[in-house]
Image (cartoon, rainbow, N blue to C red):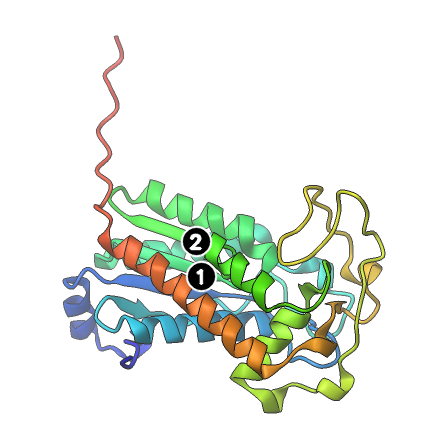
Amino acid sequence: MGEPLLYERLSWPQVRDVVGEDRVCLIPAGTLEDHGPHLPIDTDTRIASEICRRAAAALPDDVVLLPPIIHGYTPHHMAFPGPITIGWETFVKHAVDIGTSLARHGFRRMLFLNGHGSNIPLMEMAARLVGLEHPGVLAASAFYLTSPAGLAAVERIRTSERGGMGHACELETSIYLAIDPDAVRMDLAVKGGNALEGEHFWLDWTDGPLHLMPWWNALSPTGVHGDPTVATAEKGRALLDAAVEECVGYLRELRSKPLPTPFPPSERA
């Protein structure tokens, strides 16, 4: 494993050279929001950034790592002190502008690796728009540990029941313990439930089919949904390894795919 190539540390002639290497631009995304009394508010961004850093280090000749998109769409958390939310249109346009800038410089392969649940549909739309607005560009988005292999790793490692991996939970707390244990206050970790859970609505690492998102403090007065009390650094290291392996797989696939060559619209009869 080498050192990741950091976009922000390049000079402009180096950027020009890197464009010619046909690398995948890897862009972490998250948000700042409450993660219970025991985790820092940068949890989503920190985890996505660490996954991307390790994945880029595993593929030092094929990837250029960009700084994270720090702020995301999280209005439902604003009853807690700390979150910073930006409008959903602002988020999409911001991500599209990043992709557009990269496309203007000549980059043709991009992956937005997202770590915040409410960014998911917005990130998908942003990646789609980048590809549509710049024919010949492959722009994709993904949320970590949601591939079949990633979900299998989650189920293999978890000890909590359904609902134990919702937010500031067994999974996120374990990964943060693996990344930066001194930043986690396990003495303040509390189990939190979902006041609205039912037959079709539940929140876990994979949610129920009924999608519902009220104010977060209506679901949990502590901001925690899940069971961080069973989190361990050992689980976190295993989950982080699985997430990095998953991201490396995405990057290799994007690196190997032929670039799209859309044909011109047919002339009207």
Find residue 78 and report its horizontal and vertical position in percent: 73, 65
Work out whether residue 114 can be spotted: yes
Using the rendered view, name the quadrant where residue 166 is placed. Answer: bottom right
What's under tag 1, amino acid-wise? Leu
What's under tag 2, amino acid-wise? Ser
Using the rendered view, name the quadrant where residue 135 is placed. Answer: top left
Q: What numbered label is drawn on residue 141? A: 2
Q: Name above or below for residue 182 compared with residue 216.
A: below
Q: In which quarter of the image is the N terminus?
A: bottom left
Residue topped by disc 1:
113
Mark 2–mark 1 CB contact (< 8 Å): yes
Find residue 50 and report its horizontal and vertical position in percent: 46, 75
Q: Which of marks 2 and 1 is nearer the N terminus?
A: 1
Find residue 193 and report its horizontal and vertical position in percent: 81, 63
Disc 1 residue crowd, few under 14, some 14–19, many 20+, Cα 10 Å: many
Residue at the location (71% across, 76% down)?
230
Residue at the location (32% across, 60% down)?
251
Q: Specify whether 258 is left or right of 7.
A: left
Element carrying mark 2: strand
Residue at the location (79% across, 43% down)?
199
Q: How far apart are marks 2 and 1 (CA)?
A: 6 Å
Residue at the location (71% across, 81% down)?
38
Work out whether residue 68 can be spotted: no
Disc 2 residue crowd, few under 14, some 14–19, many 20+, Cα 10 Å: many
Q: Name above or below for residue 264 compared with residue 123.
A: above
